[in-house]
Image: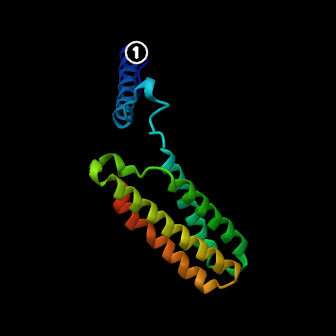
Amino acid sequence: MVSKSPVWFLLASALTAGLLLQLTSVRAATTPLQDPDTEDTEEHEETPMEKQMERVEDAMRSLRRSVRKPESRADSLAHVQECQEGLLLAKELEPMMLARIPEAEKATFKRDFRLGMVEALETYLELERALLEERDDDAKDLYKKAAGLEDPAHEIFTEDG
């Protein structure tokens, strides 16, 4: 039996308020603090190199699916073109690690970076030729070769390794 006395009402109100306070405290404790002035700039701005490399990575992800299917050859050619364009634009940019390289080694580092980009472009040109000549098995192998160039290059030329 529930009494209608003010004591029960106050007790119920206090319990409800306590529960609400506890729930908001849990939410506040699990939500990361954000500075209102930096809310929009939370993510770091991508460098031109990162933008081009992400472009290549996205195209490679799509190419991985399309290169398996001869009927998707036109799509594969478009993805290869996207990779080539991204690499060509990135080739003229400075590698991300260049700032950490001793001055005496910078010229060699830049040369090696550019040679790596040339090798990647050559592989994508071979892949394009294989697709145009309808050599689908060769295209799959060249895709694997192109994909295999990424990790060793990142080990050398990026901070992430």
30 to 55, vertically: above or below: above
Residue appearing at x 66%, y 71% in the figure: 76
Q: Is residue 69 above or below residue 63?
A: below
- The residue type indicated by label 1 comes to Ser
Vertically, is 35 above or below 152?
Answer: above
Which residue is at the front of the view, 109 or 39? 109
Q: Nearer the viewer, residue 121 or 131?
A: 121
Q: Residue furthest top?
A: 6
Picture residue at 69% right of the left edge, 81% below the top: 70
Corner quadrant of residue 88: bottom right
Q: Residue at x 44, y 24 (%)?
A: 36
Colouring chosen for the image of the structure: rainbow
Describe residue 130's horizontal placement relative to residue 161 as left or right: right
Residue 99: give x, y in percent of width and height: 34, 45
Within-10-Å neighbours for mark 1: few <14, some 14–19, many 20+: few
Going 49% across and 76% down the picture, which residue do you hit? 145
Location of mark 1 (residue): 5
149 on left or right of 123: left
Q: Quadrant of the N terminus?
A: top left
Q: Nearer the viewer, residue 10 or 59?
A: 59
> Where in the figure is residue 35, as x and y percent of width and height?
40, 26
User: Residue 85: where, in percent of width, then height?
Assistant: 61, 59
Identify the image quadrant of the C terminus.
bottom left
The answer to which image quadrant residue 112 occupies is bottom left
Q: In the drawing, does residue 110 fall left or right of residue 69?
A: left
Counting from the top left corner in percent of width and height, residue 147 is at 49, 71
